[in-house]
Image (tube, rainbow, N blue to C red):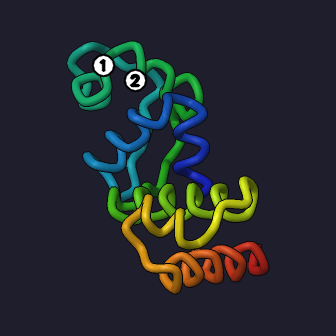
Amino acid sequence: MQKVLRELSDAVGLGDAIAICRKWGGREIRVPVKVASGDPLALVLGLETARKLVAVYGDQRLQLPSERNALLDMRNAAIWQACMVEGRSHESVGLEYGLTRPGVYAVLRKMREQEMKA
């Protein structure tokens, strides 16, 4: 999962992190220092969640992944967890996520390559 998405999820929760990517994904946003009920962040997320975001990221710029990329990254992380941590078979994980065994293998290979680069 992309670092910014993981950090957003920790700050405001996974559902709201996805909502942020859905609305502003693929762009850089500037998080204000203060937020009011009529601000775009508050209108999309609700005032309480917007305040959580401001508390963590106030006066910073965030480069957000597109919603599609964010969701794929989350799916891939879940596949990694299921196979490599829980020890489930490629076939059972593939059935759960709508992939073939080679598709699951390709996801795991991609995740390994990303780990090696990091």
Q: How many marks?
A: 2
Closest to the observer, 93 or 40: 93
| Circle 1 residues within 10 Å: few <14, some 14–19, many ≥20 | some
Question: Which secondary structure lies at badge 1?
Answer: loop
Residue 58 is labelled as none
| Circle 2 residues within 10 Å: few <14, some 14–19, many ≥20 | many
Closest to the observer, 38 or 69: 69
Q: Which residue is mark 2?
A: 50
Q: Quadrant of residue 28?
A: bottom left
- Residue drawn at the location 45% of the way across and 18% of the way down: 51
**Dot 2 amino acid type:** Ala
* Residue 1 seen by the camera: no
Q: Is residue 47 above or below residue 62?
A: above
Q: Is residue 74 above or below residue 59?
A: below
The percent position of residue 8, horizontal first and vertical second, equals: 53, 40
- Residue drawn at the location 78% of the way across and 79% of the way down: 116
The percent position of residue 31, horizontal first and vertical second, equals: 44, 37
Question: Which secondary structure lies at badge 2?
Answer: helix
Q: Is residue 100 above or below residue 59?
A: below
Marks 1 & 2, CB-CB < 8 Å contact: yes
- Residue drawn at the location 39% of the way across and 33% of the way down: 16
Left or right of 19, for residue 91 = right
Residue 46 is labelled as 1
Q: Quadrant of residue 89?
A: bottom right
**Dot 1 amino acid type:** Gly
Q: Quadrant of the C terminus?
A: bottom right
Q: CA distance from mark 1 to mark 2?
A: 6 Å
Left or right of 101, for residue 116 = right
Q: Quadrant of the N terminus?
A: bottom right
- Residue drawn at the location 33% of the way across and 56% of the way down: 67
The percent position of residue 82, horizontal first and vertical second, equals: 63, 57
